């Protein structure tokens, strides 16, 4: 299973763009990159998923360089409600090999 | 839609007692998982089931057993609870729907277990 490394914590002011980078040097050819968000006392919820280049949805963007050894989750114009823990996961999507969560990045948004 | 439902939500056990956490999903997913999350920590995989009839150990399986009763249900059993098993337990399910649709894990609301 590909191991991921993320910053333990980040602080940001409201309205700023936040970029959280995840390192996954031993990513395999069939692996996808998925990001989850977790609020206190809740289960994680899916944010975005990608394989290469750039993926964008209504919540975030995911940037993946050509070598795929890292990825960056970009949250535009964060608000206080974006304060949460963000997890980067790497793995194939077959379901036969489970996705393993690391410690995540604790994002604190300040007014 | 209910999604992933787990019970009980809260439980206090005495050391040595046994209990079973129940989990059911109504999304017809093949894969199901049990994670635990200690305070301030990330999620650690206890057991998973890639499909009905199969189960495999995750990162921290010791002290737990699981049963994939059918496609919908995946239970987690603590045979002899220990204080070190005090944690929040999350059940989850997922389904691979092709490379264009990806694979999203859906989580239950969590079960808070305290062993005294």
Image (cartoon, coloured by chain):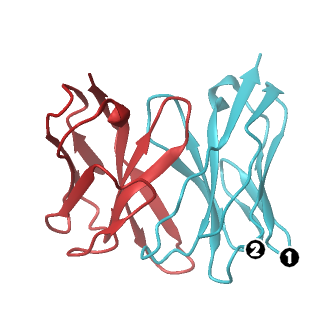
Chain colours: A cyan, B red
Q: Is residue A20 visible?
A: yes
Q: Position of residue A29 (x, y in %)?
A: 68, 83
Q: Residue at x 26, y 67 (%)?
A: B28
Q: Residue at x 55, y 53 (%)?
A: A101
Sequence-wise first label, 1 or 2: 2
* Quadrant housing residue B100: bottom right
Asked if residue A104 lies left or right of residue B104, the reply is right
Number of the label disc, if any, that sits on residue A52? 2
Q: Residue at x 29, y 31 (%)?
A: B113
Please tell me which residue lies in front, B100 or A28.
A28
As displayed, is residue A72 above or below residue B22? below
Would you say the residues marked 1 and 2 are in contact, meaning their CB atoms lie under 8 Å apart?
yes
Q: Quadrant of the C terminus of chain A?
A: top right
The residue that label 1 is drawn on is A66
The total number of labels drawn is 2
As displayed, is residue B22 above or below residue A38? below
Please tell me which residue lies in front, B40 or B15.
B15
Asked if residue B55 lies left or right of residue B73, the reply is right
Q: CA distance from mark 1 to mark 2?
A: 7 Å
Q: Position of residue A13 (x, y in %)?
A: 82, 24
Q: Position of residue B65 (x, y in %)?
A: 23, 56
Per the image, label 2 sits on a secondary structure element best described as: loop
Instruction: Sort mark 1 into few (<14), some (14-19) or many (20+) by Cα contacts within 10 Å.
Output: few
Q: Chain of mark 2?
A: A
Instruction: Judge if badges 1 and 2 mark residues of a common chain.
Output: yes
As displayed, is residue B12 above or below residue B105? above
Instruction: Sort mark 2 into few (<14), some (14-19) or many (20+) by Cα contacts within 10 Å.
Output: some
Please tell me which residue lies in front, B14 or A97.
B14
């Amino acid at each position: 299973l590909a191991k991921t490394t993320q910053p333990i914590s980040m602080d940001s002011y409201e309205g700023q763009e936040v970029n959280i980078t995840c390192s996954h040097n031993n990513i395999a050819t069939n692996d996808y990159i998925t990001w989850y968000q977790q609020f206190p006392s809740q289960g994680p919820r899916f944010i975005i998923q990608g394989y290469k280049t750039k993926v964008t949805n209504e919540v975030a963007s995911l940037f993946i360089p050509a070598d795929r050894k890292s990825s960056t989750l970009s949250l535009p114009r964060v608000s206080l409600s974006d304060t949460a823990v963000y997890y980067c996961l790497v793995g194939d999507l077959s379901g036969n090999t489970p996705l393993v969560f690391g410690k995540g990045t604790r994002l604190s948004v300040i007014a | 839609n209910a999604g992933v439902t787990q019970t009980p939500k809260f439980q206090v056990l005495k050391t040595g007692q046994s209990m079973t956490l129940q989990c059911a999903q109504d999304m017809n997913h093949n894969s199901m998982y049990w994670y635990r999350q200690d305070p301030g920590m990330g999620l650690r995989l206890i057991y998973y089931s890639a499909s009905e009839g199969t189960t495999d150990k995750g990162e921290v399986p010791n002290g737990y057993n699981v049963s994939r009763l059918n496609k919908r249900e995946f239970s987690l059993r603590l045979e002899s609870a220990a204080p070190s098993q005090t944690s929040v337990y999350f059940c989850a399910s997922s389904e691979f729907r092709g490379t264009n649709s990806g694979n999203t894990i859906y989580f239950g609301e969590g079960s808070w277990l305290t062993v005294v």
